Amino acid sequence: MNDDSPVLRIGGRPVARYVTRPALPDRLSPRPYLHPVTTLAGTAVTELAPADHTHHLGVGVAVPDVEGHNFWGGRTYVRDRGPTELDNHGTQRHSGFRLREPEGFVEELRWTAAGTELLRERRTVTAVALTGTAWALDFAFSLTNVTARALTIGSPATNGRPGAAYGGFFWRARRERDAPRVFTADAEGEEAAHARPADWLALAGAGWTLVLAGATAETRRDPWFVRAAEYPGVGSSLAHDRRLTVEAGDTFTRRVVTVVADGTLDRTGAAGLVREAVSP
């Protein structure tokens, strides 16, 4: 395990690599990410900088609008103009690990833009053993406003683009010939699951399944942002229909636990693994 790319392991088996200091152009909003993330059988279930969206970086935290600064990468959605190339990209800078073990770590990060630190983050990531064919990635982050004034977090949806409330925890999944199946406990398909809260949401591809679950009350209230037909990706929406305000000195926390399974799970199997993964 080196300083820049610690590897998470389950029973000695590598299941994810974490890159803390990626060499990326400013346009991609440089930030730490997990890639590749794999099933226990070795199937990769993430993508890094795919041709369709080069700013999608495996698994991590990405926010398109923090007081007008882009921590998502790519173009910025501007009201009445649409997606626009702007010189407004921020950077999430790794400042150190408070804890590092084979199965996970606790990391400190600083979110800076235009030479100013806006947010300070504590990120806790753990690989959790579940069964012989499934494990879970437990990903929590707490963001603190370190400025002297309130900050607001937005999304393209809050800036005028309907259905595009992305921003927060985000998982860019494996792209295959066919789009993955999307389902929750009571909804089927991308359209039915998108922009709605649910205790858990699954993407099932060819021989693999991801089941994402909100593990705090706040995360469970956040609607899911889902893409399957255009590209496979899912995340929780911090700013769905209104901007999220973070007062000076205040902290907010989100936690998403993702089951990473070999094979194609049904609803019963997905729900059972989520209960095991999220249980205290």
Image: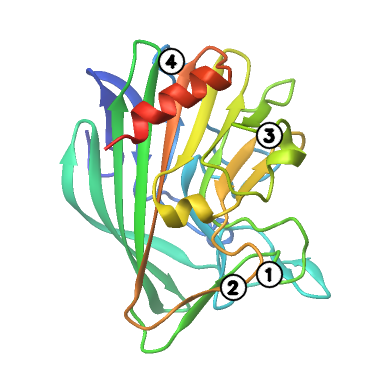
Q: In the depicted view, which residue is nearer to us: 250 or 76? A: 250
Of helix, strand and loop, which one carries label 2? loop
What is the number of the mark on residue 42?
Answer: 4
> In which quadrant is the C terminus drawn?
top left
Task: Count neighbours of disc 2 (C-alpha within 10 A) and say few if under 14, some if 14 to 19, many if 20 or more.
Answer: some
> In which quadrant is the N terminus drawn?
top left
Mark toward the viewer: 4 or 2: 2
Q: Are marks 4 and 2 in contact (CB under 8 Å)?
A: no
Total numbered badges shown on the rendered structure: 4
Q: CA distance from mark 1 to mark 3?
A: 25 Å
Q: Position of residue 67 (x, y in %)?
A: 54, 78
Q: Quadrant of residue 173?
A: top right
Residue plotted at (66% across, 58% down)? 165
Q: Which residue is mark 2?
A: 243
Q: Are marks 2 and 1 in contact (CB under 8 Å)?
A: yes
What is the number of the mark on residue 158?
Answer: 1
Q: Are marks 3 and 4 in contact (CB under 8 Å)?
A: no
The tag earlier along the polypeptide, 3 or 4, is: 4
Q: CA distance from mark 2 to mark 3?
A: 27 Å
Mark toward the viewer: 1 or 3: 3
Q: Position of residue 255 (x, y in %)?
A: 39, 49
Residue plotted at (75% across, 55% down)? 163
Q: In the depicted view, which residue is nearer to us: 96 or 155? A: 155
Q: Quadrant of residue 162?
A: bottom right
